[in-house]
C-alpha cells in the first residue's frame, strides 16, 4: 500500500529528474522546512528538500567544522558529490547556522542558476515577525518571478495554497488512524510518506495519499503493536533506525520532528493578502527549537500529541552537536517524565551504530515489559 | 611473552550443593565484547559459574562458557530448565530460551549480589559503561550508556597494563602507591594510550604515577556518566573494572559515595541476572503448563 511512497522516498533523484523531463519545469533544492514552498509551486517550480544519504563521506571536511551537525555535513556532501546536479536552484530559509553553512558552501562550490537566502525571522513570537516576513515574501516572490519568467497571480497562489493544505489534511488523516489500538501503518511507513511529500509534486502526492487512505482503515498487517512510542527531535530521516526499533516489539504512533508532524501540522489560513497568509502559516507553525523562544511552545504541543496518541514512551533524539535541540531536550524530557511517559535519549550521527543503539532500545522497551520477567 | 593484560579465567561450583535435589535449574550466559560468563543457579541460589575471554565466535564462546561452568558437576544442558542469553552476543547464544539485555541483567544481578537496597548500579565492562537506576527488585527505572568510543573501559585498561608491563590484577593497587595524586591524563583514548604513557615515562614518571594518572582519568570519565543519571544510594559497581581498586577508590572520592563491597566476582553480575530472569520465566512456564 505504501510501495509508491516508499519508491519516491528511496529514489528521490530519479523522481525529480523524471519530473523535470516530463514537465520541462525547474527544480529547486531547499534546506529547511521554513521555505514557503507554496510560492515556488505557484510558479511551477518543484521544491525538493535536500537530505543526506547516510553514507560515510570525506568531502566536507575543508568546508564545514567537525563540530557542526552530521546532518548538515551529509547534506553538503550530496551537493559536492554531484548527486543533486539536476537542481536549477537552491535556497534556504534561516533556521540554524549549521545548515546555513551547508547552503553557503553549496552555493560557492556547486553554483546553480538561482540561489536564495530567505531571512526567516528567528523570533517568531514577536508581533513584528509577521509584517517582517510578509515583506520578505514580497521580495522572494519577485525573485522567483524574475528567475522563472512567470508572473505569479493571486489565483496561482490560491491554487498552490489549496494543494498544499490538502496535502497537510491528507497526512493528518493518515496520522489520525494511528491513534487506534492497532495502527494500520508503521512509523517507518509514516516517515516515508512525509519524506516523499517533501520531494514530490504535491498534486501527485495527494493523489497517492487518497488511494492510501481509501484502503488504510481496513488494512490488517498482522503485526503486534507492542509498546506505543513517539519519536521527538531534530531532522531525522533515518528509516533504518525506525525499522530497527519497530522490529523490537514497538510501534511509533506519532512523532514531533521536521520529517514528520512539524512539516505539515499547520495549514495556511485564508487572508486577503496571500503572502501575508503564507507568512502567518510559517510564523505560527509548530516551531523548530531554533525559533521556540522565549516561551517553549513546543512542549505543550508534544504533551498533547503524546496524550492523544496514547503514547507509552518517547525516544528523544537529536543530531549530534545540534545546539537548538540540545537546549530544549532536558526540558522536554522532564515534561514527558512528569507526565508519566518514559524517555530514551539518543544522539544520531550520519550512520547510526545499530548494535549499540539496539541494546539501548531493547533495554528501554524491557522497562515496559519487565514485569513479565519477574516472579 | 608475558601477557600482562590477561586476567584470570576460572570456574567454580558449590560442592556442598547437590543440584539433583533442586527443583529449578536455570542459567544465564553473558557473552560480552571482551569476556563471557555462564552462571548456573539452583532454586535461585548461585551454584556454578565460569568466566573466560570471549573468542571471535560468539556462539562458540557461549557454548564453551556453559560447558565449563557445568564441568565436573554432572550437569548437562538438558538438565537446565531455562537459559537466558545476555550481553553483546545475547542473540548468539544458540541454546538460550530468551535474550535479555545486559542492562536489565546487571540490575537484577546486582540486586542479588549486593542486596535489595541497591538503587544505582555502575557496570564497567570491557567495551562500555552503563549507569542503571533500579528498584528494590532490581527492576530498571532509568539507564544511560557511554557513547560509541570504548575509551576508559576494561579494554583500555588491558592495553595500559600491557604497555607498562604490569599484571592487570595489580594495576589498581599500584596506582594508589603515589604520594600525591598526579593530574589525570588528558586523553583516555585506547589508541592514544601508548603515546600518552610513553611521554609520561620519558619524563621520568614512575609506573605507579602513570597508572594513577590513567585511573584518575577513567574514573573522571565515568563520573560524568554517573552525573547524568544521579547517584542514589546504595551504590554498587559490577563488571571487571569493579575489581580495580585504583579506579573504584578515585570514583568514590569524586562522587562522595562509597560503593558496596562485593561478596562475589563482579564480572558474573550479568550472567547472574540472566539466571535469575531464567528462574522467573521457568516458573511462569511451569505454571502455564
Image (tube, rainbow, N blue to C red):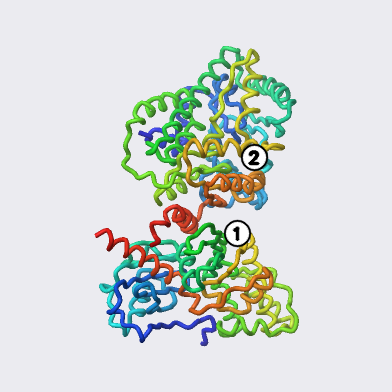
Q: Is residue B14 left or right of residue B140?
A: left
Q: Nearer the viewer, mark 2 or mark 1?
A: 1
Query: Are marks 2 and 1 in one subunit?
Result: no
The disc numbered 1 marks a residue on which chain?
B
Number of numbered markers: 2
Estimate the x, y position of residue A205 in percent, counting from the top left: 45, 27
Q: Quadrant of the N terminus of chain A?
A: top left
**Which element is circle 2 on?**
helix
Q: Would residue B226 be found to the left or right of residue B181 on screen?
A: left
**Quarter-wise, where is residue A156 in the image?**
top right
Q: Is residue A77 visible?
A: no
Assign the C terminus of chain A to one quadrant of the image. bottom left
- Residue B77: image x %, image y %? 28, 73
Q: Which image quadrant for residue B252?
A: bottom right
Report crowding for label 2: few under 14, some 14 to 19, many 20 or more residues within 10 A (C-alpha).
Answer: many
Q: Nearer the viewer, residue A361 or B89?
A: A361
Residue bearing the label numbered 2 = A289
Residue A320 drawn above or below residue A261 = below
Protein chain holding label 2: A
Residue B229's mark?
A: 1
Residue B81 shows up from this direction? yes
Which quadrant of the view contains residue A190?
A: top left
User: Looking at the picture, how far across and down is residue A300, in whole percent?
Assistant: 60, 37
Indicate the secondary structure of the residue bearing disc 1: helix
| Mark 1 surroundings within 10 Å by alpha-carbon count, few (fewer than 14), some (14 through 19), many (20 or more) | some
Amino acid at each position: 500500500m505504501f510501495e509508491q511512497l516508499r519508491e519516491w522516498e528511496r529514489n528521490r533523484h530519479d523522481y525529480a529528474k523524471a519530473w523535470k523531463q516530463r514537465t520541462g519545469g525547474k527544480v529547486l533544492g531547499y534546506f529547511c522546512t521554513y521555505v514557503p514552498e507554496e510560492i515556488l509551486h505557484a510558479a511551477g517550480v518543484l521544491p525538493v528538500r535536500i537530505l543526506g544519504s547516510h553514507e560515510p563521506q570525506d568531502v566536507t571536511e575543508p568546508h564545514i567544522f567537525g563540530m557542526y551537525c552530521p546532518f548538515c555535513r551529509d547534506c553538503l556532501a550530496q551537493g559536492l558529490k554531484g548527486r543533486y546536479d539536476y537542481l536549477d536552484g537552491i535556497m534556504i530559509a534561516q533556521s540554524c547556522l549549521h545548515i546555513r553553512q551547508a547552503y553557503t558552501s553549496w552555493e560557492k562550490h556547486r553554483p546553480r542558476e538561482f540561489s536564495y537566502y530567505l531571512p526567516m525571522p528567528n523570533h517568531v513570537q514577536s508581533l513584528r515577525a509577521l509584517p517582517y516576513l510578509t515583506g520578505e515574501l514580497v521580495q522572494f516572490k519577485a525573485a522567483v518571478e524574475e528567475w522563472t519568467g512567470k508572473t505569479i497571480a493571486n489565483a496561482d497562489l490560491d491554487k498552490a495554497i489549496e494543494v498544499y493544505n490538502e496535502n497537510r489534511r491528507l497526512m493528518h488523516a493518515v496520522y489520525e488512524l494511528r491513534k487506534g489500538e492497532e495502527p494500520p501503518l508503521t512509523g517507518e511507513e509514516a516517515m516515508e510518506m512525509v519524506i516523499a511529500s517533501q520531494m514530490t509534486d504535491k498534486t501527485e502526492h495527494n493523489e497517492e495519499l487518497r488511494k492510501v487512505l481509501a484502503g488504510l482503515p481496513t488494512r490488517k498487517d498482522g503485526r503486534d503493536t507492542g509498546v506505543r512510542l513517539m519519536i521527538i527531535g531534530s531532522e531525522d530521516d533515518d528509516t533504518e533506525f525506525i525499522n530497527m526499533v519497530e522490529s523490537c516489539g514497538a510501534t511509533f504512533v506519532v512523532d514531533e520532528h521536521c520529517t514528520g508532524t512539524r512539516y505539515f501540522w499547520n495549514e495556511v489560513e485564508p487572508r486577503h493578502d496571500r503572502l501575508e497568509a503564507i507568512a502567518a502559516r510559517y510564523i505560527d507553525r509548530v516551531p523548530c527549537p531554533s525559533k521556540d523562544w522565549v516561551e517553549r511552545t513546543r512542549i505543550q504541543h508534544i504533551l498533547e500529541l503524546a496524550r492523544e496518541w496514547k503514547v507509552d514512551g518517547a525516544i528523544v533524539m537529536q543530531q549530534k552537536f545540534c545546539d537548538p535541540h540540545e537546549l530544549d531536550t532536558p526540558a522536554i524530557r522532564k515534561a514527558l517524565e512528569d507526565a508519566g511517559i518514559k524517555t530514551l535519549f539518543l544522539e544520531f550521527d550520519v550512520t547510526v551504530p545499530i548494535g549499540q543503539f539496539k541494546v539501548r532500545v531493547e533495554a528501554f522497551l524491557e522497562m515496559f515489559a519487565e514485569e513479565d520477567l519477574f516472579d | 611473552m608475558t601477557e600482562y593484560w590477561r586476567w584470570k579465567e576460572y570456574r567454580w561450583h558449590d560442592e556442598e550443593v547437590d543440584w539433583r535435589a533442586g527443583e529449578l535449574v536455570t542459567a544465564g550466559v553473558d557473552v560480552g565484547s571482551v569476556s563471557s560468563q555462564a552462571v548456573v543457579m539452583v532454586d535461585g541460589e548461585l551454584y556454578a559459574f565460569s568466566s573466560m575471554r570471549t573468542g571471535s565466535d560468539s556462539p562458540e564462546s557461549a557454548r564453551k562458557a556453559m560447558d565449563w561452568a557445568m564441568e565436573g558437576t554432572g550437569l548437562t544442558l538438558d538438565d537446565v530448565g531455562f537459559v537466558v542469553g545476555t550481553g553483546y552476543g545475547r542473540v548468539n547464544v544458540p541454546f538460550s530460551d530468551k535474550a535479555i539485555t545486559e542492562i536489565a541483567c546487571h540490575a537484577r544481578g546486582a540486586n542479588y549480589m549486593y542486596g535489595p537496597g541497591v538503587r544505582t548500579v555502575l557496570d564497567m565492562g570491557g567495551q562500555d559503561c552503563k549507569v542503571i537506576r533500579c528498584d528494590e527488585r532490581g527492576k530498571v527505572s532509568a539507564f544511560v550508556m557511554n557513547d560509541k568510543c570504548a575509551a576508559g573501559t576494561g579494554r583500555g585498561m588491558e592495553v595500559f597494563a600491557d604497555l607498562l608491563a604490569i599484571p592487570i590484577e595489580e594495576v589498581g593497587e599500584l596506582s594508589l602507591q603515589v604520594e600525591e595524586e598526579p593530574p589525570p591524563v588528558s586523553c583516555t583514548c585506547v589508541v592514544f594510550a601508548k603515546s600518552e604513557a610513553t611521554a609520561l615515562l620519558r619524563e621520568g614518571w614512575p609506573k605507579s604515577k602513570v597508572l594513577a594518572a590513567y585511573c584518575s582519568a577513567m574514573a573522571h570519565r565515568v563520573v560524568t556518566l554517573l552525573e547524568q543519571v544521579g547517584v542514589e544510594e546504595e551504590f554498587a559497581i559490577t563488571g571487571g573494572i569493579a575489581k580495580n581498586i585504583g579506579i573504584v577508590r578515585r570514583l568514590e572520592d569524586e562522587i562522595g559515595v562509597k560503593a558496596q563491597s562485593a561478596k562475589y566476582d563482579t564480572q558474573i553480575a550479568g550472567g547472574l541476572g540472566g539466571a535469575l530472569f531464567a528462574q522467573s520465566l521457568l516458573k511462569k512456564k511451569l505454571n502455564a503448563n
